[in-house]
Image (cartoon, coloured by chain):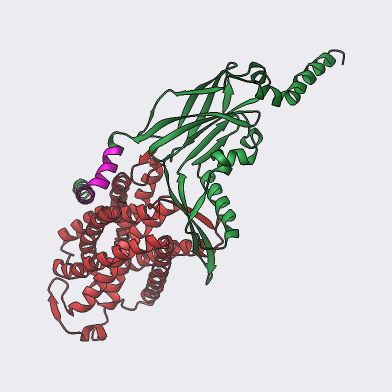
Amino acid sequence: MRRLLPALFALLFAALPAAAQMPMLGDSIEQRERLQIGVSTTEIAITSDFAGADLTVFGSVDYADELLMAIGQYDVIVALEGPKDIATVRKKERLFGIWVNRRPMTLEHVPESYAISSTRAVDSIAVDTALNDRGVGIAHLPLIPIGFVGNAANLGEFRDAYRRLKTGSGLYARDTAGVRFVSPSLFRASLRLPANIPNGVHTVHAYLFKSGVFVADKQLLLRVVKTGLEQAITDAAHERPFLYGVFAVFLALVTGWGASVIFKKN
Amino acid sequence: MSIYLPIAELSVNIFVILGMGAAVGFLSGMFGVGGGFLITPLLIFYNIPPVVAVATGANQVVASSVSGALSHFRRGTLDVKLGTVLLIGGLVGATVGIWIFSLLRSLGQLDLFISLLYVVFLGTVGGLMLLESLNAMRRTRRNETVTLKKPGQHSWVHRLPLKMRFKKSKIYLSVIPIIALGFAIGILTSVMGVGGGFIMVPAMIYLLRIPTNVVVGTSLFQIIFVTAYTTVVQATTNYSVDIVLAFILMVAGVIGAQYGVRVGQKLRGEQLRALLGLLVLAVGLRLAIALVVTPADVYSVVVGGMN
């Protein structure tokens, strides 16, 4: 018990200034914090045995207040946003006993994939409005419907469904402990890229929050490309679709003919 | 070992695909059908987008029909003339089918329509096949002669004009029902990704009364061309033929088929038909259940234009 007491005191002292000095210190800083990030690669190759990949983002927080940093008032969020496209959410309803897609809602400009890592749960870093403003976090991505004519009360339902399905398929993922400070100013963020990651230009977007207030952000581009044969096949399928189709048929003819020749001998 | 499918844009386990191909190939060799009606639903159950599953299924059927048709050609159980007439209807039907396919896809009802078609056709054909073969088995047990072609009995089909003589099949028949049959199957080929053998064979036997020995070879002959045509058109309009997926299925399929043929030869015709009927019914039932049972999630998400 006697040994525990000093430890308890130390804890109390550490906690007190955090609460009391937060606003004062924040105001008195002349030099704004700066955020720097770097990625080991600017290109992720999807090979034929691609089963997902891990991406590590390194970064530093310059001109940070040392005291605030020491008591963990700085939070870093790193998000990897996939290429943006429209997405259609459909709801099935029972019609004559079978389930039929009835009501669609098309969302404009949503990232096809979204992986987010942070120093702690995004919702405990900042208040909802701050996150909504910048669209940080799966729950805070702007999901704006195009020409939605249904009942506006259903909007939330569709948005929740969209987030749930995307999270379920692994395309939207969160890691609330994925960002770690390795030194007082250096951090490392790890992001998991799922096997079904869409190819195209992705954006690594890092955000710095201080005591729940947004202070800086930084973006980097990351290309996810199919390589070699995969790319050649995709290109062929889209640029020379007729020849591609003919080749697919040819391949089938040869396979079928080959099998009948090989097995005839046996 | 996982392999990335460039058109379906997802990673799959290569052994699962090989297994599917081999199993379906085995069954198709055993029953003398293309196997498209099994491969397409299986791919959909395995999370391959239905658009890709249908187009790739058609491509796979080309391979399995070629080896089948070649062996029938060697044995002389293929009526090229009859097959060509069927083909004319088939190509027109496939073109109409592609149009329907694209329309349903834009309406977001493609998956439902594919499932409904499967349930209706597999249910009907499977049920009829099972009934017929059970009757045949009962007759054989009573030592009655089993004749599929009842002599002297002419249906309305045989009173139609534009008759043509098909030497190999030894029939004299109007081209109208033949083209109509080809047309109907052609639509199914592009919408369902099947060759249509499971419908064509019974229709040729029971409706057109074409001798059983030439039926399978001739239907396979025309299936090659209709599925080949569908593959090319699907590739040009929907960009949805996954050549990697198709190739794995084909290789496994043609090998599996060789073993299936051997097993098939040991079984009697009506036993084979009863088993095929059961199989067809089972696939149809599985799809029907999926339509009726409350889905795990009533919502679904589609990104961009791809289904």
Residue B7 in the image: above or below residue B159: above
**Residue A75 visible (yes or no):** yes
Residue A259, given in percent of the width and then of the height, sits at 23, 48
Of residues B31 and A61, the one nearer the viewer is A61
Residue B79, given in percent of the width and then of the height, sits at 16, 67
Name the quadrant containing residue A41: top left
> Which residue is painted at 48% across and 25% down in the image?
A56
Of residues A161 and A253, the one nearer the viewer is A161
Residue B26, given in percent of the width and then of the height, sits at 34, 53
Q: Quadrant of the N terminus of chain A?
A: top right
Please tell me the colour of chain A. Answer: green
Residue A249 in the image: above or below residue B177: above
Name the quadrant containing residue B294: bottom right
- Numbered-mark total: 0
Residue A126, given in percent of the width and then of the height, sits at 64, 35
Name the quadrant containing residue B124: bottom left
**Was residue A30 drawn as part of the magenta stretch in this picture?**
no
**Was residue A232 drawn as part of the magenta stretch in this picture?**
yes
Q: Which chain is red?
A: B
**Left or right relative to B46: residue B5:** left
**Left or right relative to A256: residue A7:** right
Of residues A164 and A146, the one nearer the viewer is A146
Of residues A151 and B43, the one nearer the viewer is A151
**Residue B267 visible (yes or no):** no
**Left or right relative to A77: residue B74:** left
> Which residue is painted at 39% across and 55% down in the image?
B50
Query: Magenta span: helix, strand or loop, mainly?
Result: helix
Span colored in magenta = A231-256
